[in-house]
Image: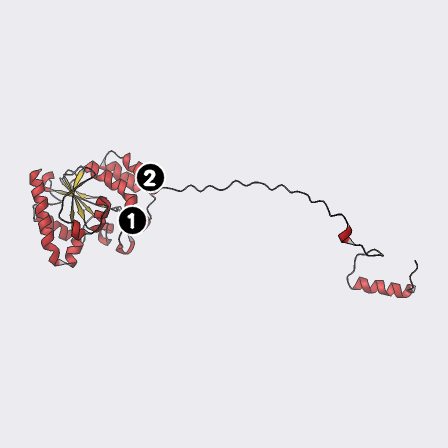
């Protein structure tokens, strides 16, 4: 079939199309592409990627295993220094382990180190510590005494200071409990003083120091006597009469022993 377009006009149209960017030619007649057989689908095999398994660390289980392996207070302290699963350690200056005579019949368990305790690496050295020393001096006990029967031994539920002196969280208490339990077991005191609400929570699983104080309880194979924390007594001097009554209870228990 001959075209009715004159040669010069056809050339001019072709040059115009080239200038417009046309670079392909099409057939003389249209094609019904819907009527064509579809192109074969090529199956692409997807590569199976195994799921990523994230192992969850159980800090309580690790603490239990580490604490159980300690056979002395020196080894227990080394285990605590190597324990890296408590974030409090990152913000603390020092590990606050203990103070006093480990052969003493009385073991005091405070809550957590404060600013001065964190600086010195010893428990109860601030204003509350001075109050504690005066309290136990009233029944002839002193952390600096050489004779075991006249001394006391002091530690805390947490060995590192919480930021801003906040209360320890339940997960932090649970994490440190294996170390504290082993600590008490190694010292083997006659009476453990749960000093304040947090200590009662750790040692007795209860809170409410006003209700608990002054009553000897037998838990974990040792006697526990809850008492008001010295910091509470500094804020509430009227409660000192209850602290004195608790000290007399403690003195009577020591005399029985």
Q: Label for residue 170?
A: 1
In this figure, which residue is indicated by the disc labeled 2? 61
Percent position (x, y) of residue 78? 28, 39
- Write the residue at 77% across / 51% down: 35
| Picture residue at 16% right of the left edge, 51% below the top | 211
Question: Where residue 213 sits in the image (x, y, percent)?
Answer: 15, 49
Check disc 2 and report its element: helix, strand or loop: helix
Which label sits on residue 200? none
In three-dimensional space, the C-alpha distance between marks 1 and 2, rounded to whole angstroms, equals 16 Å
Q: Residue 108 versus residue 26: which sits nearer the camera?
A: 26
Q: Residue at x 28, y 41 (%)?
A: 80
**Colouring mode (rainbow / by chain / secondary structure / one colour):** secondary structure
Judge whether residue 147 can be spotted in this image.
Answer: no
* Residue at 11% across, 39% down: 148
Location of the N terminus (image quadrant)? bottom right
The percent coordinates of residue 25 (x first, y second) are 81, 56
Q: Position of residue 21 (x, y in %)?
A: 77, 61
Q: Quadrant of residue 179?
A: top left
Above-or-below relation of 145 to 27: above
Report the label total.
Answer: 2
Q: Earlier in the sequence, mark 1 or mark 2?
A: 2
Q: Quadrant of residue 241?
A: bottom left
Quarter-of-image position of residue 225: top left
The crowd level at tag 1 (other Cα within 10 Å; few <14, some 14-19, many 20+) is: few
Q: Is residue 9 above or below residue 75?
A: below
The image quadrant where one finds the C terminus is: top left
Classify 167 as above or below 68.
below
Q: Secondary structure at mark 1?
A: helix
Considering every residue shown, the one lying at the far front of the view is 35
Front residue of 177/218: it is 218
Residue 132 appears anywhere in the view: yes
Q: Residues within 10 Å of mark 2 (few under 14, many from 20)?
A: few
């Amino acid at each position: 079939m001959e075209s009715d377009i004159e040669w010069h006009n056809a050339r001019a149209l072709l040059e115009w199309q080239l200038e417009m960017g046309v670079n392909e030619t099409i057939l003389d007649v249209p094609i019904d592409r819907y009527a064509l057989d579809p192109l074969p689908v090529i199956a692409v095999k997807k590569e199976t990627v195994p799921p990523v398994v994230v192992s969850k660390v159980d800090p309580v289980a690790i603490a239990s295993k580490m604490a159980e392996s300690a056979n002395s207070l020196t080894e227990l302290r080394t285990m605590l220094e190597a324990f890296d699963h408590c974030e409090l350690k990152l913000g603390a200056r020092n590990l606050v382990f203990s103070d006093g005579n480990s052969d003493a019949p009385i073991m005091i368990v405070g809550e957590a180190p404060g600013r001065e305790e964190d600086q010195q690496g010893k428990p109860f050295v601030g204003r509350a510590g001075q109050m504690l020393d005066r309290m136990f001096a009233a029944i002839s006990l002193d952390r600096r005494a050489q004779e075991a029967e006249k001394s006391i031994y002091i530690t805390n539920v947490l060995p590192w200071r919480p930021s801003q002196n906040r209360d320890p969280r339940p997960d932090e208490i649970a994490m440190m409990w294996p170390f504290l339990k082993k600590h008490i077991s190694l010292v083997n005191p006659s009476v453990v003083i749960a000093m304040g609400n947090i200590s009662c929570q750790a040692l007795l699983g209860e809170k409410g120091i006003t209700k608990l104080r002054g009553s000897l309880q037998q838990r974990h194979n040792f006697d526990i006597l809850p008492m008001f924390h010295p910091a509470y007594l500094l804020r509430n001097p009227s409660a000192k009469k209850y602290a004195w009554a608790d000290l007399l209870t403690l003195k009577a228990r020591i005399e029985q022993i």
